[in-house]
Amino acid sequence: MGASRLRGWGGVGTMAVLCALALAFVLLLPRTLAAHHHHAPDQAGQQLAEGSQVRAGACEDAEAQNQTLAPSGADGPAIDAIKARQGAKRKLIVGVDQNSYRWGYRNPNTEGARLEGFDIDLVHRIAQDVLGDPDAVQFKAIPTNQRIPAIQDGRVDMVVRTMTITCDRLGQVAFSAPYFKTGQQVLAPKSSAVTGYNGSLAGKKVCTAAGSTAYAKLAADKKSGTLPASTDISTTVPNQLDCLVRLQLGEADAVVTDGALAASQAAQDPTVELKGAPFTTEYYGVAMKKDATDLVRRVNRVLVAYRASGWQASYDTWLSATLGRDSSASRPPAPQYLRTS
């Protein structure tokens, strides 16, 4: 992969330039990915819950948030609309990141700066199932704070972009079953006095992505007094990688983001490191329109097969070097399916 060339200031600078140029237009990526259309049974040990995906009083913690529609291979209005696209436009339109190292990023060491990563592998698997071709994808680079509007406006069919399932977001979009477990962590220079999500953040400027769960957590904790009142959380950016640049330029003292993303950024720049343990439990899901129930069910069926064959290989390729082969993140989370009457 030539990952060493991506580390440090030079690697981030190269990626930032590529990202700025690419954000202005739709990303089309030809890639051959060995993927197979599975019709696997639902995973053993799955849990069933009564009701709809968002129920009053039921969305209180991460486990409740993860309840989703049962898998199905049946087509419906959302899938029919995708399949009805003609010619070169007959593609799955997916919002992704292109600057999150090892998740969804343009690798400058490949021909054409190919889009690669853990999220990208999953997108190809979904395209294989829905359209019979893993490369039948139109990628759109979506900033963190535009993920939900892009879905609601119909600019994309779905977003696969390290997007945490939350109660607030469940009121705006629908989510698949979770495909990854993570938690918020602090990233700071190795020489920093910051030790984690604690009093050492007093008087420090903390950077987060606008619209992220990290910012929501910091704002809530500062209001409740859990976070020191002197912590400055006013620095927000459209894309999470921009926080790493702010950190390198001395415009921020620390970054708060998903530990999975922070570990990848630490791999890019050896002068920074994770500080302290994760202080939340969060799960990534594929986000779609609230009424796209057939598409949600189809993605959930894809995930059943992907957990059985494909997920682990992708994790080992992209994430094991930074997150470990035996960590809590190294196995796919189990689904919880709603029982509908």
Image: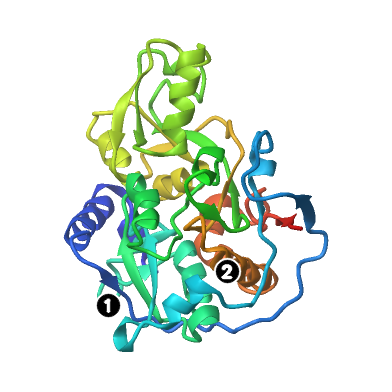
Q: Position of residue 273 (x, y in %)?
A: 44, 37
| Disc 2 from disc 1: Cα separation | 37 Å
Q: Is residue 112 visible?
A: yes
Label 1, secondary structure: give it.
Answer: loop
Q: Residue at x 25, y 68 (%)?
A: 26
Q: Please tell me whether residue 42 is drawn above or below residue 168 in the rendered image.
A: below
**Disc 2 packing (10 Å; few <14; some 14–19; many ≥20):** many
Q: Quadrant of the N terminus?
A: bottom left
Q: Are marks 2 and 1 in contact (CB under 8 Å)?
A: no
Does any portion of residue 268 appear in the rendered image?
no
Instruction: Classify 10 Å Cα crowding around label 1: few (below 14), some (14-19), many (20 and above).
Output: few
Label of residue 294 in the image = 2
- Disc 1 marks which residue? 111
Question: How far across and how far down the image is residue 211, in percent?
Answer: 38, 39
Q: Determine the secondary structure under disc 2.
A: helix
Give the residue displayed 50% in from the left and 11% down from the top.
225
Instruction: Determine whether, in the image, residue 311 is placed left or right of residue 199.
Output: right
| Mark linked to residue 267 | none
Earlier along the polypeptide chain: callout 2 or callout 1? 1
Q: Nearer the viewer, residue 174 or 13?
A: 174
User: x and y percent of residue 198 in the render?
Assistant: 52, 19
Furthest residue toward right:
45
Front of the two marks 2 and 1: 2
Q: Compared to 87, does 24 lie above or below? A: above
Q: Amino acid at mark 2?
A: Asp
Quarter of the picture holding the C terminus: bottom right
Q: Is residue 69 left or right of residue 167?
A: right
As rendered, which of 320 and 73 lies closer to the eye?
73
- The amino acid at mark 1 is Glu
Q: Residue at x 45, y 43 (%)?
A: 262
On screen, residue 86 above or below 267: below
Most foreground residue, 241 or 96: 96
